[in-house]
Amino acid sequence: MSTSYVYDPLYLEHNRPGHVECRERLEKTMQVLQERDLLDRLVKVGATPVAMDSLLEVHLQHYVEQAKQASEGGGGDLDADTYVNNRTHEVALLAAGGLLNLLEAILEGQAENGFALVRPPGHHALPGRGMGFCIFNNIAVAAKYALKKKGLSRILIVDFDLHHGNSTNDIFYDTDNVLYFSTHQYPFYPGTGDWNNIGTGVGEGFTVNVPLPAGVGDDGYARIFDELLYPIAERYCPELILVSAGYDAHWADPLGMMQLSATGYSYLARTLRQMAEELCRGRLAFTLEGGYDLGALAYSIAATLQSLLGDEEIADPLGPSPRPSAQVDDIILHLKGVHRLV
C-alpha cells in the first residue's frame, strides 16, 4: 500500500514576516523532501476547502464568520499569538479540507497512510475562537467527519506536539468515540493537560494526558509510546489513528526544552505505523501542527515519511541532542496506575 501526502502552495499565503509560524516552515520542508526524492515515492492528494457543514461540527458559526471578516478586512490578530492576513480564511479552509481529502483517500483504500502538510496548525483552535497560531482545529474536524460521515465509532488521536492540544482534549472529553493521547511539556503553554484530566461521563478514561518535564528525549518518548500508548491502543482497538504531529519537541526548537531528534521522531512514526497495521488495517493520518526550527522541522518530517514508507534507515543531519535527557520512570509508573495498565 502507498503513503500519500497533501500539500498546496496556497498554504504559504497565510504569513506574517517575523512570526515563527511562517511560510518558510513548509518551504524548507518541501525543499528537503524534493532533495531526498521522497515526493516521487508518495502519492499526492489534492486539497480542496472544507465543506461548511463539516467545519460547523467543530466550530461555531459566529466564529467562522468572525475569522472570515477579519481576513477579508485585511487581517489582524485573533489573540496575542494568532494572526490573520488577507488570505488566512481561504488557507485555513484549505488546510482542514486537505486533511479531510487525505482521510478520504485512506478510508477508501487509495492509500494506507499519509501526511497532511498543511498550515495553519489546528489543535489549539477552540470552537469559538482562534488560539496559539491555530485558526480551525483540523484534526477535530477530521475526527468528527470520520464519525459522522464514514460510520466509524472508535478513533485514536495521538498528539506529540510540544504543547498540549487543549481544544482537541476538550472537544472529545465526554465521549468514548475518540481516545485522545497527548505527550506535552508541562507546565507550559497553554497550561492544560495535567495527568488527572482523563475525561468525564462516558468519556472517563478516554483522555490520556502525559505531562512531561523539560528535557525528555528519544528514549523517554519511545518508552512512553511502547509502555503506555501501545497497550492503551490495543485495549481500545481503534478503527483509525489520527496524529497531531508537532515537531517543536525537537532539541533544536526555539520554543521548547525537550530533547527529541529526527531519529526519535522516526521511531514514533514507525511505532504508530506498526500499531495501525496491527489494529486498524494500517489506517493512519498525520497532520502538521508545530515545529519552528526550519531544519529540525524539515528533517523530522522527512524522517516521519520515511518511516511511513517502511524505510529502516533515515538521515538525521542534526543528530542527537547534545544535552542529557530527563527520566520518565515515575511518570510511566504513575500513569500505568491511573489508566489501569498494572
Image (spheres, rainbow, N blue to C red):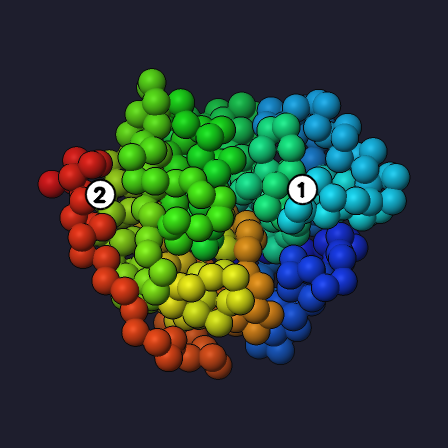
Q: Residue at x 57, y 69 (%)?
A: 293
Q: Is residue 87 above or below residue 257?
A: above
What whole-number distance in Å separates the C-alpha atoms at marks 2 and 1?
34 Å
Residue mark closest to the camera, 2 vs 1 = 1
State the residue position of label 2: 335
Picture coordinates of residue 126, whole percent (x, y): 58, 33
First in sequence: mark 2 vs mark 1: 1
Callout 2: few (<14), some (14-19), or many (20+) C-alpha neighbours within 10 Å? some
203 vs 326: above or below: above
Q: In this figure, which residue is indicated by the disc labeled 1?
A: 79
- Closer to us: 276 or 217: 217
Kind of residue sitting beneath label 2? Leu
Q: Residue at x 17, y 35 (%)?
A: 340
Horizontal relation, residue 229 to residue 89: left or right = left
Q: Residue furthest top?
A: 201
Q: Nearer the viewer, residue 80 or 224?
A: 80
Number of callouts: 2
Q: Secondary structure at mark 2?
A: helix
| Residue 270 in sight | no
Residue 83 placement, left or right of 217 = right
Q: Residues within 10 Å of mark 1 (few under 14, many from 20)?
A: few
42 lies above or below 101: below
Give the image quarter of residue 124.
top right
